[in-house]
Image (cartoon, rainbow, N blue to C red):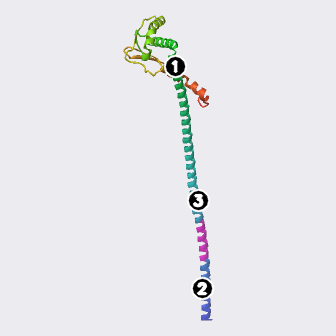
Amino acid sequence: MAISDADVQKQIKHMMAFIEQEANEKAEEIDAKAEEEFNIEKGRLVQHQRLKIMEYYEKKEKQVELQKKIQSSNMLNQARLKVLKVREDHVRNVLDEARKKLGEVTQDISRYRVILKLLIVQGLCQLTEGQVILRIRQADIPLVESILESVQEAYKQLSKKDVAIKIDPDNFLPADSCGGVDLLAAKGRIKVSNSLETRLELIAQQLIPDIRSALFGRNPNRKFTD
């Protein structure tokens, strides 16, 4: 039986509708798959960027924390240096006060005479030279001249040797010094300083740890005090 044109058209329309439906379903499937892949890729990119942002701010946070530690350490060191400076200034003030008190010794002539004799004899025993020059304050010349003979006798009793002592007529200890004596031998190549300031410095170096402890208490962080 021959197919009519109407049936042909009907079948064609049916086939076109089927093809269109298949195409739409395929397009929807492609769109769905594309949407899914897009969401997956978007999620991956978002997660990647999120991790990068977290790493960035974590790094920044560590930098800020490190900077805070550095600043805190610098401020602590500066504070410690200021404390140390104040302490050293205080120790120096104590020594300056001791130096002022030491200068008062020369006002007691009888006491100062004994001290000068002991200082000169001690220096002579250190030098053990036959000829010695004394360098003193110009104001102390009469006092030293008055004890030279007793000094020589005291030295001879200790060393069993004679010594020729001469006062330097041209060079003197500073007039504002606390007194004492410098002894020179071998044309000035050998020198023993027994000025009161020198003796104070020597004693101070030995006693500074004790002075610090007396002023500020013992430092718990120090194992040794010398």
Looking at the rendering, the stretch of residues picked out in magenta corresponds to: 26-40
Q: Residue at x 43, y 10 (%)?
A: 145
Q: Which mark is residue 88?
A: none
> How far is disc 1 from disc 2 in space, using C-alphas?
129 Å
Q: Report the residue marked by disc 3.
A: 50
> Which callout, 3 or 2, points to the residue nearer the camera?
3
Judged left or right of residue 21, residue 155 is left
Q: Nearer the viewer, residue 163 or 32?
A: 163
Upstream in the sequence, badge 1 or badge 3? Answer: 3
Under circle 2, the secondary element is helix
Q: Residue at x 43, y 12 (%)?
A: 142
> Is there a contact, CB below 8 Å, between mark 1 and mark 3?
no
Residue type highlighted by circle 3:
Arg
Upstream in the sequence, badge 3 or badge 2? Answer: 2
Q: Report the residue marked by disc 1.
A: 104
The 10 Å Cα crowd at callout 1, few under 14, some 14 to 19, many 20 or more, is few
> Is there a contact, CB below 8 Å, between mark 1 and mark 2?
no
> How far is disc 3 from disc 2 in space, using C-alphas?
49 Å
Under circle 1, the secondary element is helix
Q: Residue at x 52, y 17 (%)?
A: 105
Q: Is residue 122 above or below residue 218?
A: above
> Which callout, 1 or 3, points to the residue nearer the camera?
1
Judged left or right of residue 190, residue 24 is right
Is 219 colored magenta in this rendering? no
Q: Is residue 133 above or below residue 215?
A: above
Q: Report the residue marked by disc 2.
A: 16
Q: Is residue 30 above or below residue 153?
A: below
In the rendered image, the quadrant that contains the N terminus is: bottom right
Residue type highlighted by circle 1:
Glu
Under circle 3, the secondary element is helix
